Image (cartoon, rainbow, N blue to C red):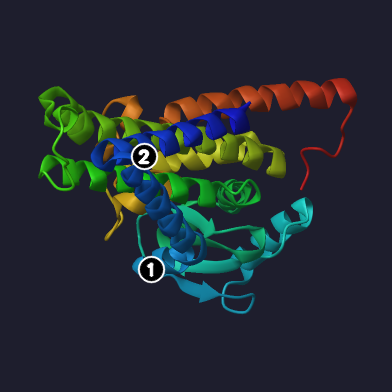
Amino acid sequence: MEIFKTCFLMVGLVLLFMFVGAWIGGEQGMIMAFLVALGMNFFSYFFSDKLVLKRYNAIEVDENSAHGLYAIVKRLCQKTSMPMPRIYIIPEQMPNAFATGRNPSHAAVAATEGLLNLLDENEVEAVLAHELSHVRHYDILTGTIAAVIAGAIAMLANFTQFGAMNRENSQRNNALMMIIIAVVMPLAASVIQMAISREREYKADKGAALMTGHPEWLASALNKLENYSRSYAIQNASPQSAHMFIVNPFGSFKDKFSGLFRTHPSTSDRIVRLNELAQQLSTSHRNHGASGFFRR
């Protein structure tokens, strides 16, 4: 069901982009919009991971330089038969983490120093399982493409706002349509982009809970991260990469607007879902006698 929702939203975003391109430049505009989206997505597919890691000054580590962190990631990858991703530590005191990369074979997970200092080992494992779940389901690629297309719609809307690329016909002089293209369409694109991001966060939470067998570990980690983020934000955080983090890198005080424009579901909703899943797994454990299910 979650995959269907994401596909539906992605198709809607692409159609919105093509509509804006068609209105601005006719049939040629629609084709141009599609080609621009294709080119931007191609660049994003191959280079977005390198750019975001560089932006946050992420430092690659290995088994020798970060034995405990490496061991957790290796254990999770063995559980899920995933390739071992590159591992990074970000020299940042606000606790947070993200994953990036176009597919499981070209992936990286990054955690801030603040996260490693704040959380216990079980909670760190749950957070990393969340990020690896994003990798397994290609969420990083999906989120990056959605961000690129939404940004391209905003760019085209700016052309309309300043009168660029307009042709002389009555439709293009329609004031109401100009307002819709310049204002409403970028807002609609942002709403769709944020909906995709929130949907994938719920999916990754569930994937992490099943990967570790302990939904309460992630619930506890999210609670700590939420409490900390009420007063702090990550330095140099960018709106383009905000959806990648496990919690909003701008801090929860920046995430109190309408739920339509949130990059992440509310932490309280995520914790409620995780607690419900913990109850379901506990019931299944008792009913089926899965004696080792919750053990490491």
Tell me the residue at 49%/34% (across/down).
Answer: 11
Q: Which image quadrant for residue 235?
A: bottom left
For label 2, the SS is helix
Tell me, for residue 91, which label it has, or none: 1
- CA distance separating discs 2 and 1: 37 Å
User: What residue sits 66% from the left and 64% below the top?
Assistant: 105
Q: Is residue 262 above or below residue 58?
A: above
Q: Is residue 237 above or below residue 231?
A: below
Which residue: 35% across, 55% down? 94
In the displayed structure, does residue 91 sit left or right of residue 155? Answer: right
Q: Is residue 247 above or below residue 1?
A: below
Q: Which residue is mark 2?
A: 17
- Three-letter code, disc 1: Pro
Within 10 Å of disc 2 (Cα), the crowding (few <14, some 14-19, many 20+) is: many
The quarter holding residue 284 reads top right
Q: Decide which of 241, 7 is in the foreground and name it.
A: 7
